[in-house]
Amino acid sequence: MAVDHRPLLQVEDLKVQFRLPTGILPAVDGIGFTLDRRETLGVVGESGSGKTVSSLALLRLLETPPAEISAGSVLFEGRDLLGLSETEISDVRGRSIAMIFQEPMTSLNPVMTVGYQIDEALMRHYGIPRREARARTLELLTLVGIPSPERNIDGYPHQLSGGMRQRVMIALALSCEPKILVADEPTTALDVTIQAQILDLMVGLQEKFDTSILLITHDLAVIAETAHRVAVMYAGRIVEAAPVATIFGAPRHPYTQGLLRSIPRIHRQRLDVLAEIPGGVPDLTRLPPGCAFAPRCPRADAHCRQERPMPVAVAPDHVVSCWKANDG
Amino acid sequence: MTSTQNIIAEAPEAAVVAARHESFVRLVLRRFLRHRLAVVGAVVVVLLCASALFANAVAPHDPTFLDTKHRFLAPFQDMGFLLGTDELGRDTLSRLLYGGRVSLAVGVVAMLTTVLSGLVVGLAAGYYGRWVDDLLMRFVDTMLCFPQVFLLLVVAAFVPPTLISISLIIGLTSWMEVARIVRGEILYLKEQDFVQAARALGAGGARIMFKELLPNAIAPVLVAATLKVATAVLMESYISYLGYGIQPPLASWGNMLTNAQGYFDTVPYLAILPGAMITLTVMSFNFLGDGLRDALDPRLRMD
């Protein structure tokens, strides 16, 4: 590998809170992770666990107020993105770090042709004239597998299907060859067959462009297929982070274990009821003083309810925030 | 992992895509043409505009020439004066054509003023929000507290009445509705995914405003603009009728009505003809506006 051993992206103690009329909601409560070159980090968790908010906070895309990044740092190539001016951060957006969103149906401007929108991004970041951008746009559309790109380059978003639009979004996100691609539930809104195609496309392009991917999803199957490392989020915190094989093979956190048990498997022995995690996601404005998962945890005791567990490395590259992590 | 071959291969779903590439404009046009009254309105509007534009070529007489030998001619009484003459022997048809030029010019200039001010205020209020929004919208509320006619008459009393000043006065007292429409649209659009996506790709404030928000807010503004031409024409005749508008001898439909009121019991056609033109113009623009509204309705976009 390269001489530079620093990770490409290093997030430390990131805290995001929303000021609501009802109180302060700590949506992201001190998360930290790293992302290396060409690596895919999967972030999993239930709805409301803070996955999307964290990803938007990286590029400072949250509406402030009500959101507020109250602590932490996001080091990208040695620079703290949270300290940049509005102009500097917008130079990073799309150029160094790009995003794909969940809803391909609504993520493209409906009144402009798809080609025009990709041209715009290229012109914005490379300062090239439209004629030059157009040639590159055509290449990109071909690369992401848009059929007859010469014709569809002048098509409007409503003329394309969801899968096609997500391909356009990928072309758009990769247009300036960013170092990091943040994909927020990129396949959730798509049919299962299309999901697989889009994932294949992303992985293929990752190799071609040497991109790192931050893949946010609630779908463990997607994680298993694409991620190298996984961070499991619960109630705004990362409860467990480990290489993908470890997460699926030897999870330590009871929440991760619960998630894995709740995956339907085709070769189950009997038609037994699918395991679920009892209870629901806690109210973030009224988190318990101890472990946020304690009320739903089968192994929680008095200690868990009173004191919040800190991240502990149970193995190299395997961090768990649980008092019982070493109890087997 | 996947080979490059696989990436480049076209997706199987491709077959259903792009069966027919119809631009948005053509889609709207197709739907507009289905709306009969709107098409009639559009045709009349085009005819009115053409007759106003080419009034000097079409008009049989000089609209200000006093022909005292031919006063109070009824329509079709003398084929030299097709629609008759007024109390000073001026040719009514020529005056209607030239008056239309003035009335429509006022309508269009006032509409442009209205739309431009409304767009600026609405865009700023919707995009910047917070105190900018509060300030601008309270200003809109204040303006709306005054009945437009009084506002018009007060200003008109102090400003010398020329075509431009009257248009500007009408425009500057009627932009509030457009501002509210635009603000509402912007507030809605601002929350849309594609705006967030554009921002995530490095788009700055100006780009977001003028490339993402504004083009998407244009359809309802277009409809409002059409309807505004109608109200401006009406307003112009209103204040001209009250004597604060276009001054004689320059003809406008409004001041033709004023002239006619002294003879209403004896030669009613002097009032009926300009009145009919005003009605026809206002109705045509309203039909056109309604048709555009239906054709541009986003809920029908999937047709």
Image (cartoon, rainbow, N blue to C red):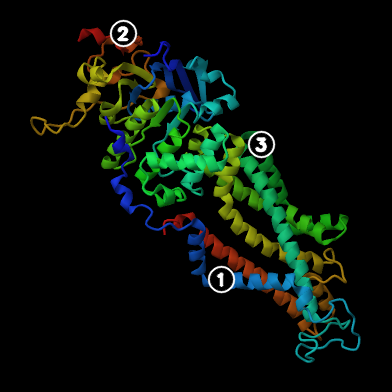
Mark 1 element type = helix
Mark 2 element type = strand
Up the image or down, B155 lies above or below B45; here it is above
Residue B168 image point, x, y percent: 77, 55
Up the image or down, B245 lies above or below A6; here it is below
Residue B60 image point, x, y percent: 79, 82
Up the image or down, A55 lies above or below A300; here it is below
Name the quadrant containing residue B254: bottom right
Q: Residue at x 60, y 54 (%)?
A: B221
Q: CA distance from mark 2 to mark 3?
A: 51 Å
- For residue A313, the mark is 2
Residue lying at the far left in this picture: please name it.
Answer: A270
Instruction: Give the residue number, with chain letter if any, for mark 1.
Output: B39
Task: Work out whether residue B174 can be spotted.
Answer: no
Residue type beneath disc 3: Val
Q: Residue at x 63, y 61 (%)?
A: B226
Name the quarter where the C terminus of chain B is drawn.
bottom left
**Subunit of label 1:** B
Q: Residue at x 56, y 18 (%)?
A: A83
Q: Nearer the viewer, residue A127 or A49?
A: A127
**Subunit of label 3:** B
Instruction: Give the residue number, with chain letter if any, for mark 3.
Output: B132
Mark 3 element type = helix
For the residues beneath circles 1 and 3, the answer to whether they share a chain is yes
**Subunit of label 2:** A
Residue type beneath disc 2: Ala
Residue type beneath disc 1: Val
